[in-house]
Structures are given as structure tokens and as C-alpha cells.
Image (cartoon, coloured by chain):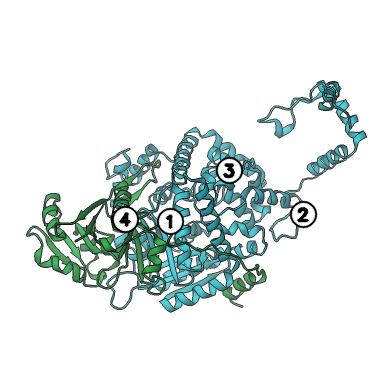
Chain colours: A cyan, B green
């Protein structure tokens, strides 16, 4: 089965699951409303977005310099820095650090980059116990499912489904469908793990070059526990997360929390600059940062595509996407779903692998309107669509260009082009189409599976206009 | 060539023209002390935190009145000049524990026996309702995180308008602490059906005592 068929099959499956669609719809409505309440002044919003865009763009422009500075500051601070070009390298680095430390159990804070590299599976194969500690991630880890949303990973599940899941795995706890009770159960189960784990793994929201600081944004406290309680902390991040100065952080943090969950600020903003110092009583004795490329430097090579890398992973684009809301995150089959996934994933994995995602967009523009760092998502999706069907469309370094090119499509469009660029052919074509409209087929293959085939009118617009007295030019 | 050099070389191949970064305007608004206290209180209570503005009662007296009422007995404090005073004046029903040994030898006790973590703060941010903590040797990182109740002492004169202002006035970039925290309420989650629930991993209750003499 090719990638397009596989994608359409996942969509088909998602569209048939009314429960999941309902869960996602109601969650997205709530998130959109909460975000709108935070940004009630359009003029201020426009200034804040422009400022956040400028900070992220500046960071990307100076990326090499800032990464070198970040590395130097982190080393001065006692944090060890590792560079990984690929997912495989990143997994190797992390498992080697864990093995050298003799770590057998790890607790994880939520990290999309760790999902991107498939870290959990990799470590479990090496007999290392990995426990997701963010409530949403904990739920989907039990269900053996990937996240369906980058901020709210278990958003496709409702409380009844979660109650059943908890009861199945922890039958000693009494069954409840109450959200507070379920939350307390998770607290109880995970607390012991935080206490006993050998190592903690987390992502990074922003890395500050000026001070060598890793910033983590969260509400639950599991990120703080994962990065503070065990003796070893390993953070992993994409190389694009670096910013120049500490004073860049407030403008980005503000846009991140308001766009993501409609919060003025999250409960915890955790800024880690050093491991435990000789006189300190807690904190990890060793802190490592893994900087992951995995295709990002290739994206940065092109001035249009690099806009993709401004993303601060708020998830606002998917919350507002009419396609995401209907099919949910799992239909995309990728780590990052929704509009940002549609733009990022084909660039990371290649159009030949996952370029079909770009068809899941109506170019409505809602994502670009809400993006806190002004990524022109529809423009980029359109660009990738063109790259997908034409190897020579541009000189942009996109993997798998032209791989979705289909001969019937090429022939159909070249006939269309001939007809529409020649007045005589156009006139002849429209005469046939209108006067022989009874010959229009009622089915046009897969295209008409969910669509009604349009029937040309008896008279063309041209004819009608002439009859109504318009001059024919 | 190492991974590092490969990555950096690729990044250096595309040099972008000198970009303009819009800097923060720190003095965009200036609140009075009372306005800041009002704003901070509004934000923290909106997310289920408690704020008490103590103008004519000493914070130790407040604790001695309130903790027995709430059944809170095991209180953990750092080795801090401000909180040390509490060691001698605490109500008889309260047992004071000091966070003065490396955590490795008494993690079990911290996770399972302590009711309250009492900390000072470096300051707060009025606009977002955030406490600023710079945990250190005297007041370790887990003190404000593991106990189910976190009580934070805040000097009314150390409340900043915004995060930007705090970064500038505390010369944060120059004095980078090992760990710095903004705490803006009790631990919470909305991972189940976007429904808020408090006390998932960190403290279930956050009590801020604003000391204003």
C-alpha cells in the first residue's frame, strides 16, 4: 500500500470513530475559547506576535553562533553537551549515558522530541524501564498509543475510557470515573516512581545561550520532579530551540502559554542552569543535554522553509484546524500532527515517505492567523504540494521531491492548460460541455466517493453574460 | 568530523542578513505597591492559590493560628535566617524538620511524612501572579515541590510588575542561579477531558503570605 492509500485508510478509520471525534471536538472548542479570552485586544496581539516572530527569527539567523555559545555556557555550568545528527545517534547517546550510570528505571517529563526519536521503545529494548509521568502521557503509555496532540496527548480519550484503563492496570484501586479521583490515583501511582527512579528524562522549551539555561514549561510538577529528584537528568531538544538572551524568554513564554492552553502563565516555569553544587542538598548530580538535528539543519538551509523552525510547539494551529478537529492526531500517523506536522514531517522524513499529509488541508488559513510566531503554514503547505509533484519546481532542499507525481494527473492538467489558454479550443470545449451535459458521468472514480460529480449548466457563463447584454471581448 | 562539526557546518552554510529583534520595553507600565498586591492576589486566587496580606500580624503568629486548624503538623524548612525564627516560636502541635542533609539519605521521609514545605521567595511578578524562587543550599529545590502544601513568604516590597522587569532588576542573567522557578499556583492538570484537577504531582495547596509592615 502506498503512503496516500495508507493515510486515507487512517482518515477513514478516524472518521468512523464518533466517540474520539466528539472528545476532540469538545476539547478543541474549549482551547480555542480560552485562547481567545487571553488575546482580547487585536492590536496588542498583533504586536506580541510580531515580537515573538522577531525573537525566533533572530535566533534562527544566528543559530550556529548561539549553539556554540550555549554549549560553552552549559559546559562552564557543569552540564554535559551531546550532538546527534540522527534519531539513532540520539537514542544511542542517551542509552549510553544511562548504562554508564547504571540507571535501570527512568521517569520522563513530556517531550515531543523523545517521541520523534522513538526513545521509549529503544530504551525498553535495552531492558530500561521507562515511565511517562505527565498525566496525559501516562494514560497513553498505558493504552500503548502515541500522543494525538502535542500539548494534550490523551485528548482523544474520555473519562470513562481512562477509568477503564486505570482499573485494568491497577485493579487494587477502586474504580472511579471522577476526574479528581483519577488524578489522585495517578499521583499515588507515580509518586513512588519519582522517589525511586534512577534517572529523569525531559524535553526543553527554550535553551538560553547567554546563561546556559534549560527552560521547561508545565502545570503538573512532573517535569520538576523528573529533573530534580533522580540523581541523573538527561534533557533532549531540537537544535532550533536555542534563543540568545534571558530577556527573550518572557515574550515567548507569554505567547506559548496563552496560545497553547489559554493560560496567563503555567503553574511552573523551571529554569535549570547547573547540576547539584557541592553545598546543595538536592538536584541531579549530573545533567546532560542532547542537541538533535534530525533534518532541521537541512530545513534551515532555505530562507522560506526555515520559517517552519520558528515553531514553539504551542499546538494552537491544530486546535484551530478544521481537518485536525475531524480526523484527530492519530490519522496523521506522525509525531507532529495538524498544520505544523503537515509542514514539518514531510521535510523531516521526506515527501516520498509522508508527503501525502499535505493533501489534508483546505488552505483555510486559520492556522496562520493564530500562530504566535507567524509561520505562514498554508503557504508552506502549498509550496510542499508543488514540490511533491514537480522535481524541478524549485531548488529548495526538500527530500523526495516529485515523488507524488502521477502521469494521469500530469496529462489531465496539460490538457486543461491547452484548452484554457486557447480561445478556440475553450469555446469548442464549453460548447460540448454545455450542450452535451447529459453525457457527464455520474461517477469519477475515487474522487466521487464522497463528492457529487458536478454537471455543467446548459448555458455557459459566457453565454449568459452575452444574453444579458455584456460586451463580448 | 564530529556530529557537532557536521551540524554547525550545515548551519553556517546559510548566512541570513542581519535580523532585527524587537526588544522588551521594561517600563511599559508601573504599578503602585497596592496595585501589585491586588493584581498578584487576583491571579493566584484565580488558580486556587491562597494569598494572605499580613499587615498587622506576624507570619509566625498566622501559622500558629492556622496550621493546627488545618491539621498540618510536619513542617519542613530550610536553613534560612528568616524561617529559622520559626524553629523556636512554632506552635507545640507542629514539628519542625530542617532540610539540611543531602536528600539521598532521607528521600522516603520527604516524600511520605512531611505535610508542609515553608520557603522564602526572591520576589514575585504581579502581572502573571508568579512567585520567584531561586532554590539554593539553604532552601533546596524539592522543598517547594514534594510536600503536599507549599507555604511561601513574600516581602511586599519585592513584587515586580512583569517578568521582564524582574530579569532586569534582579540582574538575573548575571546572577544565574543553579535552578530558578516561577510558581504560579498549586500543581494542576487538565489532561482528562480538559477538566481542571489540582494536586497532580506537586503541592495540592499553595499559600502565599505577603509580609507588609
Q: Quadrant of the C terminus of chain B?
A: bottom left
Q: Mark 2 or 3 closer to N-term?
A: 3
Q: Residue at x 64, y 70 (%)?
A: B10
Q: Which residue is mark 3?
A: A366
Instruction: Give the class, few, some or many, for how many residues have Cα within 10 Å of label 3's Cα (few <14, many ≥20).
Output: some
Label 2 to label 4: alpha-carbon separation: 57 Å
Front residue of A386 and B32? B32
Tags 2 and 4 touching, CB below 8 Å: no
Q: Position of residue A209 (x, y in %)?
A: 49, 71
Asked if residue A69 lies left or right of residue A140, the reply is right
Residue under label 4: B36
Q: Is residue A127 visible?
A: no
Q: Nearer the viewer, residue A27 or A179?
A: A27
The residue carrying pointer 1 sits among few (fewer than 14), some (14 to 19) or many (20 or more) residues within 10 Å by Cα, namely many
Residue B97, x across and y down, in percent: 16, 66
Q: Secondary structure at mark 3?
A: helix
Q: Chain of mark 4?
A: B
Q: How busy is the neighbourhood of tag 2: few (under 14 within 10 Å), some, or many (20 plus)? A: some
Q: Residues within 10 Å of mark 4 (few under 14, many from 20)?
A: many
Label 2 is found on which chain of the structure? A
Mark 1 on the same chain as mark 2: yes
- The location of residue B156, given as percent across then percent down, is 26, 60
Number of dots carrying numbers:
4
Q: Are marks 1 and 3 on the same chain?
A: yes
Q: Which residue is mark 1?
A: A110
Q: CA distance from mark 1 to mark 2?
A: 39 Å
The subunit carrying tag 3 is: A
Q: Secondary structure at mark 1?
A: loop
* Residue at 12% over, 62% down: B95
Amino acid at each position: 500500500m502506498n503512503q496516500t492509500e495508507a493515510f486515507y485508510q487512517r482518515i477513514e478509520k478516524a472518521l468512523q470513530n464518533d466517540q474520539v471525534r466528539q472528545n476532540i471536538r469538545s476539547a478543541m472548542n474549549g482551547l480555542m475559547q480560552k485562547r481567545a479570552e487571553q488575546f482580547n485586544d487585536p492590536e496588542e496581539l498583533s504586536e506580541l506576535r510580531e515580537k515573538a516572530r522577531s525573537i525566533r527569527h533572530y535566533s534562527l539567523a544566528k543559530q550556529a553562533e548561539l549553539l556554540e555559545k550555549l554549549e560553552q555556557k552549559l559546559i562552564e555550568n557543569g552540564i554535559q553537551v551531546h550532538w546527534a545528527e540522527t534519531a539513532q545517534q540520539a537514542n544511542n547517546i542517551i542509552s549510553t549515558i544511562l548504562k554508564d550510570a547504571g540507571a535501570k528505571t527512568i521517569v520522563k517529563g513530556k517531550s515531543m522530541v523523545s517521541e520523534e526519536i522513538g526513545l521509549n521503545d529503544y530504551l525498553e529494548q535495552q531492558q530500561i524501564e521507562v515511565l511517562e509521568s505527565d498525566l496525559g502521557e501516562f494514560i497513553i503509555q498505558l493504552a500503548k498509543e502515541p500522543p494525538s496532540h502535542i500539548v494534550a496527548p490523551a485528548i482523544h480519550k474520555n473519562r470513562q475510557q481512562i477509568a477503564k484503563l486505570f482499573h485494568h492496570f491497577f485493579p487494587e484501586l477502586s474504580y472511579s470515573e471522577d476526574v479528581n479521583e483519577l488524578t489522585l490515583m495517578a499521583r499515588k501511582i507515580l509518586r513512588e516512581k519519582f522517589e525511586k527512579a534512577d534517572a529523569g528524562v525531559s524535553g526543553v522549551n527554550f535553551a538560553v545561550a547567554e546563561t546556559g539555561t534549560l527552560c521547561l514549561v508545565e502545570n503538573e510538577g512532573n517535569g520538576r520532579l523528573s529533573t530534580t529528584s533522580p540523581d541523573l537528568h538527561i534533557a533532549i531538544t531540537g537544535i532550533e530551540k536555542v534563543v540568545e538572551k534571558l530577556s527573550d524568554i518572557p515574550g515567548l513564554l507569554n505567547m506559548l502559554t496563552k496560545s497553547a492552553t489559554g493560560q496567563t502563565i503555567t503553574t511552573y516555569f523551571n529554569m535549570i542552569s547547573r547540576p547539584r553544587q557541592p553545598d546543595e542538598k538536592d538536584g541531579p548530580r549530573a545533567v546532560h543535554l542532547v542537541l538533535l538535528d534530525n533534518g532541521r539543519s537541512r530545513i534551515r538551509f532555505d530562507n522560506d522553509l526555515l520559517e517552519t523552525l520558528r515553531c514553539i510547539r504551542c499546538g494552537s494551529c491544530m486546535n484551530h484546524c478544521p481537518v485536525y478537529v475531524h480526523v484527530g492526531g492519530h490519522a496523521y500517523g506522525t509525531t507532529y500532527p495538524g498544520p505544523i506536522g503537515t509542514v514539518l514531517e514531510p521535510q523531516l522524513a521526506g515527501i516520498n515517505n509522508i508527503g501525502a499529509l499535505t493533501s489534508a488541508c483546505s488552505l483555510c488559513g486559520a492556522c496562520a492567523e493564530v500562530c504566535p510566531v507567524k509561520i505562514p503554514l498554508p503557504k508552506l503547505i502549498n509550496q510542499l504540494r508543488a514540490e511533491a509533484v514537480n522535481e524541478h519546481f524549485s531548488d529548495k532542499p526538500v527530500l523526495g521531491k516529485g515523488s507524488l507525481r502521477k502521469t494521469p494527473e500530469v496529462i489531465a492538467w496539460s490538457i486543461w492548460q491547452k484548452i484554457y489558454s486557447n480561445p478556440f479550443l475553450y469555446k469548442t470545449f464549453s460548447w460540448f460541455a454545455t450542450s452535451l451535459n447529459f453525457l457527464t458521468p455520474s461517477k469519477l472514480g475515487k474522487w466521487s466517493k464522497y463528492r457529487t460529480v458536478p454537471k455543467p449548466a446548459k448555458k455557459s457563463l459566457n453565454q449568459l453574460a452575452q444574453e444579458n447584454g455584456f460586451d463580448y471581448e | 568530523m564530529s556530529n557537532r562539526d557536521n551540524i554547525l557546518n550545515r548551519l553556517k552554510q546559510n548566512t541570513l542578513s542581519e535580523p532585527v529583534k524587537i526588544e522588551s520595553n521594561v517600563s511599559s507600565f508601573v504599578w503602585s505597591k497596592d496595585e501589585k498586591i491586588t493584581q498578584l492576589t487576583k491571579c493566584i486566587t484565580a488558580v486556587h492559590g491562597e494569598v494572605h496580606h499580613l499587615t498587622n500580624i506576624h507570619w509566625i503568629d498566622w501559622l500558629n493560628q492556622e496550621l493546627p486548624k488545618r491539621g498540618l503538623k510536619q513542617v519542613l524548612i530550610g536553613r534560612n535566617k528568616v524561617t529559622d525564627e520559626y524553629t523556636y516560636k512554632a506552635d507545640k502541635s507542629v514539628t519542625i524538620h530542617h532540610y539540611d542533609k543531602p536528600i539521598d539519605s532521607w528521600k522516603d521521609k520527604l516524600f511520605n511524612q512531611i505535610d508542609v514545605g515553608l520557603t522564602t521567595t526572591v520576589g514575585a511578578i504581579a502581572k502573571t501572579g508568579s512567585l520567584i524562587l531561586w532554590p539554593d543550599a539553604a532552601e533546596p529545590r524539592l522543598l517547594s515541590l514534594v510536600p503536599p502544601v507549599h507555604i511561601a513568604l513574600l516581602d511586599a516590597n519585592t513584587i515586580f510588575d512583569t517578568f521582564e522587569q524582574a530579569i532586569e532588576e534582579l540582574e538575573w542573567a548575571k546572577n544565574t542561579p543553579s535552578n530558578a522557578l516561577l510558581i504560579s499556583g498549586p500543581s494542576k492538570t487538565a489532561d482528562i477531558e480538559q477538566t481542571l484537577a489540582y494536586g497532580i504531582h506537586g503541592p495540592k495547596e499553595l499559600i502565599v503570605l505577603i509580609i507588609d509592615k
